[in-house]
Image (cartoon, coloured by chain):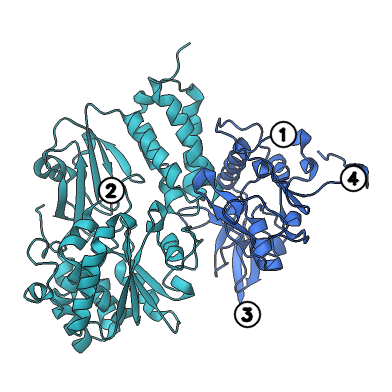
Chain colours: A blue, B cyan
């Protein structure tokens, strides 16, 4: 593995060959927000939250999947990058159901955390909201796809970690949807009690089947500013 | 600059069902010359010197693409001909395939030899199903004549998706997966179809190859402008008296094509390059058509004074929202938001701040989308806001 020198936000840093921009930044204590990416899963570059500016590139590039090259000059928090990230988060919020105060994931929702970090307020876009009926046929998992932001972490977790390949993507564009079989509610025949996808879901779209009173167990949640 | 037939030289002259008529027109001479006299590196050098650039819209230098694939490590390599021709208002590839499938086959065989590929695919648009038989017969005739001993060509039919004309989605489609884009790098010449080095060329790009091989790079290099060599085949449609396919030397004026050849009158708006292309007003009709200025895949849609710009942009964005693959957030959500805003403008319900929102959104989509569709989807919005801003302002709700 050869050493590669890159410049991130003005400082010269080194990384090894094959490393992504995100990995090189993280290794040097620079935080780039990510949503669809998890280090345990193969990158897909779907959410575009982690875009950064690279000198000589016409567009911004996804840091979770772009490998570093010798001499690359990278800006992870330039005005252009921050503006773009904000619009993307605003877009995701605009079609999201928005009933956070009733959502189990409210205080641990990654979309909300990123929105707060980037100071994104109420979205200006008046786009339609996604709505799907809750799927609660399975004794192991409840899917509320109204809250899905199509990061596909569940799809990859199921494919790559559990190797069960339960999920797929159907339909196109705005109507894209994570589906099981021919868009049937998930049931115990296709999915067993493994929880892998649930632990990867950044929002409240996937959750365990709740037992009565369970929410009152454990430590109280505190909303951090 | 005049019309000139390099790509279309055999169209309407040969019988696309009989290879002998093609052989009478110097058919497969370039392939014979390449195989007998030219090592692969020399062919690539020739293409590089010719200055031939991709005709599918992006304009990537063809020779460079081939060289990257030639040098890439791989036990197997592939040549793909992109005959998906999904861009709105283009029909040049169909015209070519209907009339001269043999030149394409010859070019693919040369490309295969040049990069070291043994297999090629023609990715045929679903709507061009009627050409399947003609192409298949052309390939088998070429095989019977012994021109395809070193190279095998298969036809893969698309299933009707616009995004599958995008090279990475096209490869996913051939692999039998959902037609969705991949992130790059790695680019196809290093890791493409099934992870192997692959070149993907538009039909029209490949049609130039045999002529470049036969006449030499220098001959080709003399035609066109400084950075746009050769000719371009245009598909002209819309409010014109003579819609159709025209081949012009690159650098020719839009006026010559639209007014003199296609006989348009009272032109108001011209969309160059289809749904993701540029929209320009009549004032700019003296713009030369080249990679330096505007070109795209050569779709020219003409709108006369009876047409409304907001309707055109709204319909275009609705189309793109429909055809977006849904993988990346800015394109999936952004096209939908744009369609919503434009729908309100089209019925006079716009709000003043929408214009600023459109501009900001366009900027973010262009900068962050995963593929060319999302990056170019805001083009019609940006251009119309630049040249026809008053049309938007007049649709802002009063009171």
Between circles 4 and 3, the one closer to the viewer is 4
| Both marks 4 and 2 on one chain | no
Q: Distance between the residues labelled 4 and 3?
A: 49 Å
Query: Dot 1 corresponds to which residue?
Result: A99
Q: How far apart are marks 1 and 3 (CA)?
A: 48 Å
Query: Dot 2 corresponds to which residue?
Result: B294
In the rendered image of this protein, does residue A110 appear above or below residue A29? above
Q: In this view, does A147 lie to the left or right of B4?
A: right
> What element does badge 4 sit on?
helix
Q: Can residue B231 be seen in this view?
A: no
Q: Which of B58 and B152 is in front in this view?
A: B152
Q: Which residue is drawn at 45% across and 76% down?
A: B196
Q: How far apart are marks 4 and 2 (CA)?
A: 62 Å
Of the numbered discs 1 and 3, the one sitting upstream in the chain is 3
Query: Dot 3 corresponds to which residue?
Result: A1
> What element does badge 1 sit on?
loop
């Amino acid at each position: 593995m050869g050493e590669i020198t890159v410049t991130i936000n003005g400082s010269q840093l080194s990384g090894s060959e094959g490393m992504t921009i995100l990995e090189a930044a993280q290794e040097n204590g620079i935080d780039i927000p990510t949503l669809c990416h998890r280090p345990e899963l193969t990158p897909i570059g779907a959410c575009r939250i982690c875009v950064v500016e690279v000198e000589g590139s016409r567009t911004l590039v996804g840091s979770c999947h772009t490998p570093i090259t010798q001499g690359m000059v990278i800006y992870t928090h330039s005005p252009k990058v921050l503006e773009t990230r904000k619009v993307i988060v605003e877009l995701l919020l605009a079609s999201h159901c928005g009933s956070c105060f009733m959502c189990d994931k409210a205080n641990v929702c990654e979309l909300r955390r990123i929105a707060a970090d980037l100071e994104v307020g109420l979205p200006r876009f008046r786009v339609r909201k996604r709505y799907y009926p809750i799927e609660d046929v399975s004794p192991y998992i409840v899917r509320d796809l109204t809250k899905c932001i199509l990061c596909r972490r569940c799809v990859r977790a199921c494919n790559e970690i559990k190797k069960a390949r339960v999920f797929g993507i159907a339909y196109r564009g705005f109507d894209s949807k994570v589906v099981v079989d021919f868009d049937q509610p998930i049931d115990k025949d296709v999915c067993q009690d493994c929880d892998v996808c649930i632990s990867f879901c950044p929002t409240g779209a996937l959750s365990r089947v709740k037992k009565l009173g369970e929410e009152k167990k454990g430590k109280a949640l505190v909303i951090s500013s | 600059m005049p019309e000139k037939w390099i790509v279309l030289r055999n169209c309407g002259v040969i019988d696309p069902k009989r290879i002998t008529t093609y052989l009478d027109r110097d058919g497969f001479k370039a392939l014979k010359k390449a195989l007998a006299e030219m090592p692969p590196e020399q062919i690539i050098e020739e293409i590089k010197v010719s200055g031939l650039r991709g005709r599918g819209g992006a304009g990537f230098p063809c020779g460079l693409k081939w060289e990257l694939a030639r040098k890439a490590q791989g036990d197997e390599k592939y040549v793909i001909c992109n005959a998906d021709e999904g861009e709105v208002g283009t029909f040049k590839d169909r015209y070519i395939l209907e009339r001269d499938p043999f030149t394409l086959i010859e070019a693919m065989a040369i490309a295969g030899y040049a990069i070291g590929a043994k297999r090629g695919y023609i990715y045929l648009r679903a709507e061009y199903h009627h050409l399947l038989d003609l192409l298949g017969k052309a390939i088998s005739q070429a095989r019977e004549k012994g021109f395809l001993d070193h190279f095998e060509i298969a036809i893969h039919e698309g299933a009707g998706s616009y995004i599958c004309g995008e090279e990475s989605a096209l490869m996913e489609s051939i692999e039998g997966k959902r037609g969705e884009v991949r992130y790059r790098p790695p680019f196809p010449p290093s890791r493409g179809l099934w992870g192997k080095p692959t070149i993907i060329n538009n039909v029209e790009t490949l049609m130039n190859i045999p002529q470049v091989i036969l006449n030499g790079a220098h001959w080709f290099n003399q035609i066109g402008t400084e950075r746009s060599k050769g000719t371009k085949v245009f598909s002209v449609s819309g409010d014109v008296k003579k819609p159709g396919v025209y081949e012009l030397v690159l650098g020719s004026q839009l006026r010559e094509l639209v007014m003199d050849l296609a006989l348009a009158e009272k032109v108001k708006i011209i969309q160059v390059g289809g749904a993701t292309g540029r929209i320009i007003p009549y004032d700019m009709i003296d713009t030369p058509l080249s990679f330096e200025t505007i070109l795209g895949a050569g779709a020219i849609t003409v709108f006369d004074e009876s047409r409304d710009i907001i309707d055109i942009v709204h319909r275009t964005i609705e189309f793109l929202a429909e055809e977006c693959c849904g993988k990346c957030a800015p394109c999936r959500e952004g096209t939908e938001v744009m369609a919503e805003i434009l729908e309100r403008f089209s019925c006079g319900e716009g709000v003043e701040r929408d214009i600023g929102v459109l501009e900001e959104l366009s900027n973010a989509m262009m900068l962050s989308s995963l593929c060319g569709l999302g990056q170019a989807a805001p083009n019609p919005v940006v251009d119309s806001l630049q040249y026809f801003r008053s049309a938007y302002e007049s649709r802002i709700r009063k009171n």
